[in-house]
Amino acid sequence: MAVYITGLITQPQARTTSIAESIGLVSHDQLTRMLRALGWSISSGAICVVKFIELLGITGGYLIIDDVLIPKPFAALIAFCGWDWDHSRHYNVFGQRLVFVVWCNGYLIIPLLFAFWQKDTTKPRKRKKRARGRPRKRGRPIADYSAKARARRQQYRRKRKAILRRKRLPTGVHYRSKNELARVLVWKLMRAGIKCEFILFDNWYASEDNLALFERLGLYWVTRAKENAKVYYLDERLMVKEVASTVEKQNYHYYDALKARVRSFQVTLVDRLVKLTVIKDDTAPESGRTKYLMTNALHLTNQEHIWWYRLRWAIEVFFRDIKQHLNLTSCEARSEEVIIAHVVLVCIAYTFMQLLKPLATQQRPSIGSTIKTIVPLVVAADSRQFARPNPSGSIQVVSFDHLVLAFRTRFSNLPCPENPLLT
């Protein structure tokens, strides 16, 4: 497992063959058997991460929900694959869709739970409307109306319906939508004992059932709404863009810290009072110059409401890092257990890289700069020293205390081991 995680961090294309050849210590078959026999359940892994956060004494965190697409254009036989819309490429892509729940405190981003999502194959496909005047193609005309022929036609229809009802997953798991998966993941985390007050997500997960569950779990939610979302304002059912148009843009308050004009309204959404914050001329990196934000935390100011929603961008950074730096998309396995094990080990590698952030020279270093800092470290076991190769080719001796300095300064209550080379 340590060799595989090292390969995920250090190799540009981390596959079991390249990891075994470049790092050594284990063979390709041993890595493959390890992935198949890992057998970690996602729930037990989340419980371990929650206990790890409690051990470090980190507080002030919040949850973020979002999904990511892993393109697999040449993977017809890989599990969890299907056709889905890619928002970055603006066309359908064959790949795997994962729903993630991450924990963040503004500095650390720790993935907690994930689930694979696939489209519902039981729904009948929509037929395209034919041009007017064009005759519709039909099957062969019925020539036999006998009882035997009617029974044969009914049997054919029953078989056809059974094919449409057939589950896509070979394990027989019932289909769940993205919102249902999000509710299951958040409920498991709260049962595991995660401590947080806010949960952030975009408008895709702002369904009525999701909002009801989050409030029942005692969470404040912050989300973005579509412009045609219906709310009650002044005893009238209006779209949020109609509510925003009741006040001229010149009357919106301009915030220098936000570089935008903001106005808030108190509206009713599904029998609950929520705060609607409208942003005009927004300069944030997320798409949309006009945004409509909603929350059930009525005590938040306009600026606090917007800052809370902008904190959701951390999960987009997480998706970028695990794709570009930790080889999330490099897994070519076909079986379900190996694919799940690969994603779990990617999350472990990402958590490990988060704890090594203070090793870099920047104040808030990225995963890429952290990897560049730790990859050149090698161990000279014969001289009982750690050595770091410099870009000029010279060797710089580094003490073991320097390696664990990041942990000791960042987490003072975490016990660090002694130098293993001296034992």
Image: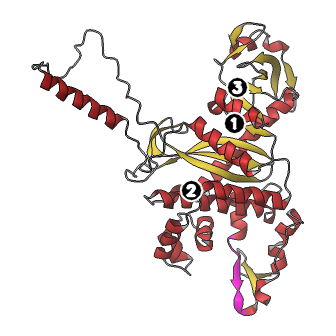
Image position, residue 148 (x, y; %): 13, 26
Helix, strand or loop at mark 2: helix
Q: Which mark is residue 328?
A: 2
* Residue 267 in view (yes/no): yes
Q: Residue 325 or 391: which is nearer the viewer?
A: 325
Image side of residue 210 versus residue 59, left or right? left
Quarter of the rendering occupied by the N terminus: bottom right
**Which is nearer the N-term, disc 1 or disc 3?**
1
Task: Find the magenta span and give its range.
Answer: 375-382
User: Residue at point 34% right, 17% down?
Assistant: 129
* First in residue order: circle 2 vs circle 3: 3
Q: Quadrant for the C terminus, please.
A: bottom right
State which mark lies toward you, 1 or 3. 1
The image shows residue 13 at horizontal and vertical percentages of 53, 63
Q: Give above or below for 6 relative to 74.
A: below
- Three-letter code for the amino acid on which mark 1 is drawn: Phe
Name the residue that disc number 3 marks. 289
Q: Amino acid at mark 2?
A: Leu
**Based on the displayed image, in which of its 4 quarters is residue 134 positioned?**
top left
* Residue at horizontal 38 percent and vertical 28 percent from the top: 124
- Whole-Å distance between the Cαs marked 1 and 2? 22 Å
User: Residue 131 location in percent, x, y?
Assistant: 30, 14
Residue underneath mark 1: 201
Which of labels 1 and 2 is toward the front?
1
Q: Are marks 2 and 3 in contact (CB under 8 Å)?
A: no
Say if the magenta span includes residue 210: no
Res. 395 in view: no
